[in-house]
Image: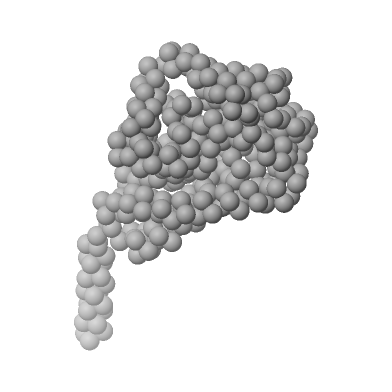
């Protein structure tokens, strides 16, 4: 009888624990955020490095961030697919890399919007700009958590390049956005769309002659050993966007959704300080390692800018949503001191 009573007490206790667990709030559940980028040891990678401890602290460890740089979760197309399906929780990359999800993303890498890097940062801080970018992302099953500014673009060549004529006939790797291809073609180059992981082998094998991106990428991947002639053109900015999957985001309780979004924006100033120092450091490293830096003459810079502005007009004309977003961004740039 005593044994039966003891068993009864144990059963009652177990039932009580089960009831408590069943009544526990869903917010106690833990979540994993796989955060991907194509690059390594650069501003995009650093954004994730800063974001991880900040979010884990803000959520008391309820969200664990796993970092996957260097294309570990696949090429850009795979990362876009993963974001939209919810198999990859987060990714960061230059806006134009996401043109496959929505062609309007390429607008942030079009000429005629930003005066310089600092101006680009001020434009991206505008509430109406952030909303415009976020609205596009949500339509494609992605949520924007951060807008960063990498740098103004440049090109690296395997042979010396100091003028527009040096683009003539050169096979230049571009992101697959139509606007960038048109811009390179307007300078006389032959645009070659290519995923990030294929660039170095293509340079080594002579498949391409030059690449367009930013100084941080050149230094991180030691391009000074293969294509040491940098032409600092600054025609447009590289604006990396940090996204999370809407499918994943929608499964989070409201307090964690807020933490994910708020933390993404909150870490931007820290990354900005880091990136400004990194650009200065990278410039020194590039030169110390034998890399060269040239600029177009003022007359040629003006001519190149004019050609690029003309080249993107057909791209804008045939796609009204892209044109509308470009006009929004251009107006934001013009109104931002």
Q: Viewer-proximal residue, 220 or 23?
A: 220
Q: Position of residue 147 (x, y in %)?
A: 41, 43
Q: For the point 74% across and 50% down, which residue is it? A: 289
232 vs 273, left or right, is: right
Q: For the point 35% across and 42% down, which residue is it? A: 125
Quadrant placement of the C terminus: top left
Q: Viewer-proximal residue, 319 or 189?
A: 189
Quadrant placement of the N terminus: bottom left
153 vs 270: above or below: above
14 vs 284, left or right, is: left
Residue 32 in sight from this viewpoint: no
163 vs 91: above or below: above
Q: Position of residue 235 (x, y in %)?
A: 54, 30
Q: Viewer-proximal residue, 268 or 307?
A: 307
Q: For the point 72% across and 51% down, which residue is it? A: 288
Q: Position of residue 292 (x, y in %)?
A: 71, 41
Q: For the point 61% across and 24% down, which residue is it? A: 300
29 vs 241: above or below: below
- Quadrant of res 160: top right
């Amino acid at each position: 009888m005593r044994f039966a009573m003891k068993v009864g007490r144990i059963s009652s206790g177990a039932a009580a624990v089960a009831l408590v667990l069943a009544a526990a709030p869903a917010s106690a559940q833990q979540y994993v955020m796989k955060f991907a980028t194509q690059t390594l040891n650069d501003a995009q990678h650093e954004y994730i490095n800063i974001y991880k401890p900040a979010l884990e602290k803000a959520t008391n460890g309820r969200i664990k961030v796993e970092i996957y740089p260097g294309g570990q979760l696949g090429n850009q197309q795979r990362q876009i697919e993963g974001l939209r399906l919810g198999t990859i929780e987060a990714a960061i990359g230059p806006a134009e890399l996401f043109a496959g999800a929505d062609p309007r993303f390429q607008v942030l890498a079009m000429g005629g919007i930003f005066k310089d890097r600092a101006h680009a940062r001020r434009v991206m801080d505008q509430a109406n700009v952030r909303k415009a970018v976020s609205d596009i992302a949500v339509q494609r099953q992605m949520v924007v958590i951060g807008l960063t500014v990498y740098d103004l673009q440049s090109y690296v060549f395997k042979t010396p390049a100091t003028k527009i004529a040096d683009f003539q006939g050169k096979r230049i790797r571009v992101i697959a956005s139509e606007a960038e291809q048109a811009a390179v073609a307007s300078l006389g180059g032959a645009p070659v769309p290519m995923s990030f992981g294929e660039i170095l082998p293509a340079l080594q094998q002579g498949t391409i002659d030059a690449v367009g991106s930013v100084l941080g990428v050149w230094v991180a991947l030691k391009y000074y050993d293969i294509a040491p002639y940098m032409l600092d053109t600054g025609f447009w900015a590289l604006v990396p966007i940090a996204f999370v999957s809407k499918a994943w985001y929608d499964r989070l309780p409201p307090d964690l959704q807020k933490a994910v979004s708020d933390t993404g924006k909150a870490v931007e100033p820290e990354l900005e300080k880091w990136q400004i120092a990194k650009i200065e450091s990278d410039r020194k490293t590039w030169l110390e390692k034998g890399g060269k830096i040239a600029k177009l003459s003022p007359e040629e810079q003006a001519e190149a800018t004019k050609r690029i502005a003309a080249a993107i007009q057909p791209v804008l004309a045939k796609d009204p949503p892209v044109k509308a977003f470009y006009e929004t961004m251009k107006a934001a740039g013009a109104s931002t001191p």
